[in-house]
């Protein structure tokens, strides 16, 4: 097997892979830092130039999404909304549609997922390169009143968004990355790339196969031994996302504080070390992984006797809980 790779558009070495149709495919690997994480694309292409162009366009699409939805960028549409509480802000149809879906998720999940969590993430220091600090409890409690998805007012007639209260702030960290992956996958398919994998910091969409008879092999990190895997499995035309307490955290007074906050308490969710979700789209996987990390396995089984998604929980004690369909449908192999 030969490989092509380029890092930030640096072309490395060419090689071939046999395809199921009897021709040859190039394996193109590209990497770029976007969405606050490393984004990798592996594309199986019939020509080198087509594969490189497809990856370039996919990255440009992710960059466009980031420019539109990041609350860290001052000129994004989300920042424009955050800077104008109490006033209707005209937004693109794309932004309006994403916020409409985000609000629907919040409603369906009873506020355990809430994109109005921005005041809390900023207080904790999860924006940009701020140091994570333990906030004053009274200050945190005071901010909870500004976390309320029902006060995100969406006017479909003129596609405006209004944050009903001063002090509110949007943060799309639990949905935008998944949406960006889905958009990048659409671009690759438009470029006639049928077999590819997009990995944005552990949120993954895998299309087609890696090679004839070989689905894409995916590994799930062990949340406490990050050099090890807790499980591996096969994926084809599906998405997977993991929410964990081990990527962005600080140990303060001997206790782990991480970036996945419970919107109702303002503190990091404490029922799990990690939750991995498989879903048809990366957006769904992203949102469900965030939500289930906060919800916990016991409440998940109580609320959803018939699982709407397939999930693997590593609870706070390190115990695994999972749907048996993971083994049946995805050849899950548990390694711990």
Image: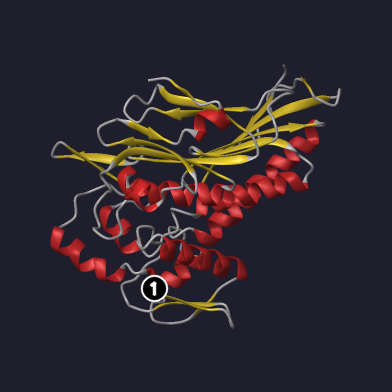
The answer to whether residue 67 is seen in the rendering is yes
Query: Which residue is rendered at x = 48% and y = 65% of the image?
Result: 104
Picture coordinates of residue 260, whole percent (x, y) = 33, 48
Q: Characterize the local packing of mark 1: few (<14), some (14-19) or many (20 or more) Cα atoms within 10 angstroms.
A: some
Picture coordinates of residue 218, whole percent (x, y) = 54, 29
Residue, far front: 305
Picture coordinates of residue 310, whole percent (x, y) = 49, 41
Q: Horizontal placement of 250 versus 17: left or right?
A: left
The answer to whether residue 44 is above or below residue 282 is above
Image quadrant where one finds the C terminus: top left
Query: Which residue is rendered at x = 71% and y = 44% of the image?
Result: 188
Relative depth, front residue between 49 and 183: 183
Picture coordinates of residue 276, whole percent (x, y) = 44, 39
The residue identified by callout 1 is 150
Query: Which residue is rendered at x = 14% and y = 63% of the image?
Result: 138
Q: Count how many numbered circles sit on residues in the image.
A: 1
Residue, far top: 1
Quarter occupied by residue 266: bottom left
């Amino acid at each position: 097997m030969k490989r092509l790779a380029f890092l930030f558009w640096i072309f490395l070495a060419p090689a071939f892979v046999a395809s199921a149709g009897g021709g040859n495919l190039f394996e193109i690997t590209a990497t770029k830092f976007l969405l606050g994480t490393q984004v990798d694309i592996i594309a199986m292409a019939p020509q080198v130039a087509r594969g490189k162009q497809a990856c370039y366009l996919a990255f440009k699409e992710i960059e466009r999404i980031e420019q539109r939805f990041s609350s860290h960028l001052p000129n994004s549409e989300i920042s424009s909304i955050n800077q104008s509480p109490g006033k209707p802000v005209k937004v693109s149809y794309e932004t309006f549609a994403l916020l409409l879906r985000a609000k629907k998720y919040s409603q369906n999940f009873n506020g355990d997922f809430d994109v109005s969590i921005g005041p809390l993430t900023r207080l904790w220091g999860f924006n940009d390169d701020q140091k994570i600090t333990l906030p004053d409890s009274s200050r945190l409690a005071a901010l909870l009143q500004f976390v309320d998805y029902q006060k995100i007012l969406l006017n479909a007639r003129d596609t405006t968004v209004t944050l009903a209260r001063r002090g509110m702030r949007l943060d799309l960290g639990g949905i935008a990355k998944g949406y960006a992956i889905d958009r990048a996958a659409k671009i690759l398919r438009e470029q006639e790339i049928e077999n590819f994998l997009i990995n944005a910091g552990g949120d993954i969409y895998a299309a087609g196969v890696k090679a004839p008879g070989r689905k894409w092999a995916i590994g799930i990190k062990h949340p406490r031994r990050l050099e090890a895997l807790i499980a591996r499995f096969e994926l084809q035309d599906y998405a997977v996302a993991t929410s964990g307490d081990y990527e962005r955290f600080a140990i303060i007074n001997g206790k782990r504080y991480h970036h996945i906050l419970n919107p109702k308490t303002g503190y990091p969710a404490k029922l799990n070390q990690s939750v991995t979700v498989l879903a048809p789209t990366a957006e769904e996987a992203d949102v469900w992984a965030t939500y289930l990390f906060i919800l916990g396995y016991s409440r998940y089984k109580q609320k959803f006797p018939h699982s709407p998604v397939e999930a693997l929980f590593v609870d706070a004690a390190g115990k695994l809980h999972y749907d048996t369909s993971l083994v049946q449908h995805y050849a899950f192999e548990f390694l711990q």
